[in-house]
Image: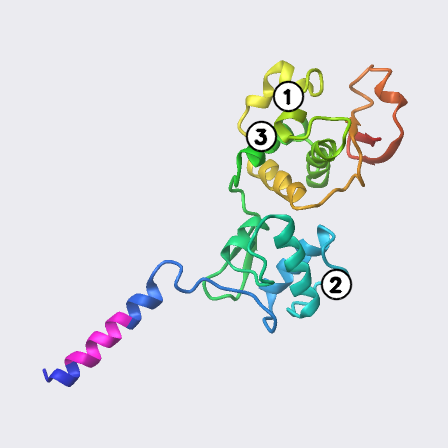
């Protein structure tokens, strides 16, 4: 085989290796991108309040600005583009071709995420998905309130706050749904509109909790301030 043909073959092998290497085809969404992958990202951003309007599958300036806001809130590199790190924080997995985004990541991304997932599973695993997100949101609303501890662990383990701590069910392993619900709450979805309390009126005889103003009911839980 001639030297020229050897060189051509070597170049072809190297090129193939680069294309097949893990992450080599990692998709990045940016202004100008379009398709079902962009639609999935937009639906997440709309659900969390970063983006208004409909998910049209077109990555324009409004989607870029919404991504920037999401990145800044979550401590990500703010470039307005959705790469693997931003997608993971959204609970999405970008396909290698960029042609689709699979929703529903059930990976634990932090200790706070793990604890919140366990709380959701213990307190609301029989509720709808929205109801599970709502329970997680109450915890986060307490963290943001001056009336409660300012950490997730502080809120969860505050004396008498949650029955799952006293009965030990907080130690159960959360399922994928609870993990996703906790992540959605961490990323800004609050179905309760800022509530600090929730209770099941059919399962409690606590007179004090019933004095709180109920703002919404999701499944078996009343959410109050």
Sequence-earlier tag: 3 or 1 = 3
Find numbered disc 3 in the image and state the secondary structure of the residue it sits on: helix
Identity of the residue drawn at 77% across and 34% down: 219
- Chief secondary structure of the magenta portion: helix
Q: Which mark is residue 54?
A: 2
Whole-percent x, y for residue 7 in the image: 18, 79
Report, in whole angstroms, how far the alpha carbon at label 3 lies from the one at label 1: 10 Å
Vertical order, 103 against 225 (above or below): below
User: Quick one: 101 or 21, which is closer to the camera?
Assistant: 21
Residue indicated by mark 3: 115
Find numbered disc 2 in the image and state the secondary structure of the residue it sits on: loop
Identity of the residue drawn at 77% across and 26% down: 147
Sequence-earlier tag: 2 or 1 = 2
Q: Is residue 105 left or right of residue 51?
A: left
Q: Nearer the viewer, mark 3 or mark 2?
A: 3
Q: Tell me which segment is drawn in magenta.
A: 6-14
């Amino acid at each position: 085989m001639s030297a020229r043909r050897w060189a051509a073959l070597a170049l072809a092998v190297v090129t193939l290796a680069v294309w097949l290497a893990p992450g080599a085809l990692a998709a990045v969404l940016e202004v100008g991108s379009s398709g079902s992958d962009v639609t999935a990202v937009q639906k997440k951003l709309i659900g969390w309040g970063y983006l208004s309007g409909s998910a049209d599958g077109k990555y324009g300036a409004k989607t870029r600005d919404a991504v920037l806001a999401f990145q800044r809130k979550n401590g990500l590199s703010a470039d307005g583009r959705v790469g693997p790190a931003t997608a993971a924080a959204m609970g999405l997995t970008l396909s290698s071709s960029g042609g689709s985004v699979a929703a529903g990541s059930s990976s634990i991304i932090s200790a706070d995420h793990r604890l919140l997932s366990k709380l959701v599973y213990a307190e609301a695993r029989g509720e709808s998905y929205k109801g599970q997100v709502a329970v997680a949101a109450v915890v986060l609303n307490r963290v943001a309130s001056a009336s409660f501890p300012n950490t997730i662990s502080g809120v969860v383990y505050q004396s008498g706050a949650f029955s799952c701590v006293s009965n030990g069910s907080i130690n159960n392993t959360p399922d994928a749904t609870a993990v996703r619900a906790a992540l959605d709450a961490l990323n800004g979805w609050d179905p309760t509109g800022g509530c600090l309390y929730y209770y099941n009126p059919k399962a409690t005889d606590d007179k004090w909790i019933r004095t709180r103003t109920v703002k919404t009911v999701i499944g078996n839980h009343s959410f109050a301030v």
